[in-house]
Amino acid sequence: METIETNTAKRTAKLKTSLTRRTVEALKPDLRPWIAWDDRLTGFGVRVQPSGAKTFVVNYRSGSGGRSAPNKRVTLGRFGRLTPDQARRMAQELLGKVASGEDPAQERADARDMPTLAQAFEDYLEANPRRKPRTVEMYRMNLRVCFGDWLSRSLDSIDRGDVEARFHRITERRGWATANQAVSMLRSIYRRSSIDHEGLRNPVELWITGGGRLNRKRRRRISSPAEVLPRWRAGVEAAGLPPAHRDIFTIGAYTGMRLGEVVSLRWERIDLERGILLVEETKTGEPLELPLTCQLAAVLERRRAEAEDTDEGWVFPSSASVTGHLKNLHRYHAGITQAAGTRFWFHGLRNAFITVAERDLMLPRPLTKRLVNHARDDDITEGYAADWTVEQLREPAQRVADRVETLLGSGPPVL
């Protein structure tokens, strides 16, 4: 038996051997599923589960794309019900069909009317057409990056072991947050299909039931606003941003609004005379009505003086963007971070705003959450309490903006 690769640090082992009854019986389970490949027939192997169960499988690439073609796997049957020689003959027959242009995995899925992961994902999106385009874009990116090689696999061909191995791989390569998001999305995709197809079990649920756990959330912490705000201001100025782009960061600092909420502002929702701003594109789905502070009004007055259409147009228009407004401001983060000498990200402005409100000014937490349109806790008293009016918000909002301006440093109220 020749060992091709052994990596005990990752608890994986890949072997290439002649699959006989004696060698298959000798294969030992590991903490993760692994496959021993046959050295006589390429693509034929036996998958060893942590439980000790052993299943014969065959891998192949469909189509004429060579190594760029999607890799597919067909399960032949359990060791014990099949001997290695019987499974090898089945694998030879299946690979012969592949050589003649057939796709056995897809044919099995079609025969069972079992959707592929790609089909189930589209059904998942159609079930809730009210998702924001940015959310759908993020879901598609996670699917492509994390499960791109699974798109043509039928849902019942993905098992608990696949989920476990992929979760650890995503965590290692792309970080804990991406792994949590991707596997949680996969779990949701399966929920709908598990109801529609009798006998289909959710592999993510099985993984969790068997002891699998998502990564522990680690919240990004910032230094005190008194330390980072002046440095961020200097970083924005040093980065040489166009005026409109710089104003987006300024609004973020003085309001704690999310980036998507700022760039999607429209003039028809701004009343400079009454000092009221209505934000409709919010993460929570609830419109946000805010009073205009002196600092925010100064920025909007400057933008209106330069705007061509102040009736229905965007506050931050862009002819180069498909949305019609500026976007992709994240590209400035690295330059601002380098110039500031401390890490910068747009959501950090929101964190600083909240910290100033709650820690510096000691504003009540429900009031601060209302100012930044943060989702409410499942608190009965907060749930039935009357909402804050714009006039009630005006004085505390101005206090926070004044404090932020002081922390940013001397000069005009811009970053």
Image (cartoon, rainbow, N blue to C red):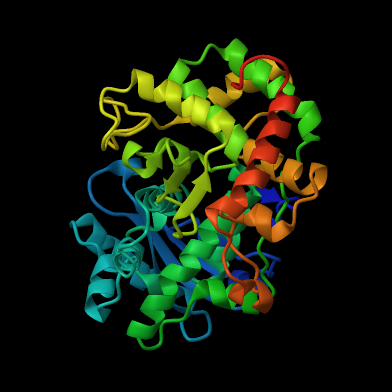
Q: Please name the residue shown 56% across and 76% down the image.
A: 205
Residue 391 visible at all = yes
Q: Percent from the top left, x then y, of residue 171?
A: 63, 50
Q: Percent from the top left, x then y, of residue 326?
A: 38, 30
Q: Please name the residue shown 69% across and 74% down the image.
A: 211
Q: 49 or 298, which lies in front?
A: 298
Q: Percent from the top left, x then y, of residue 28?
A: 69, 69
Q: 158 or 406, which lies in front?
A: 406
Q: 45 or 32, which lies in front?
A: 32
The quarter of the rendered structure image containing the N terminus is bottom right
Q: Is residue 365 above or below residue 105?
A: above
Q: 331 or 157, which lies in front?
A: 331
Quarter of image, res 270: top left
Would you say 145 lies left or right of 381 here? left
Would you say 187 lies left or right of 264 here? right
Q: Is residue 128 above or below residue 291?
A: below
Q: Percent from the top left, x then y, of residue 319?
A: 26, 25
Quarter of image, res 200: bottom left
Q: In this view, does 50 lie above or below 246?
A: below
Q: Please name the residue shown 23% across and 73% down the image.
A: 110
Would you say 318 lies left or right of 332 here? left
Q: Please name the residue shown 40% across and 87% down the image.
A: 199
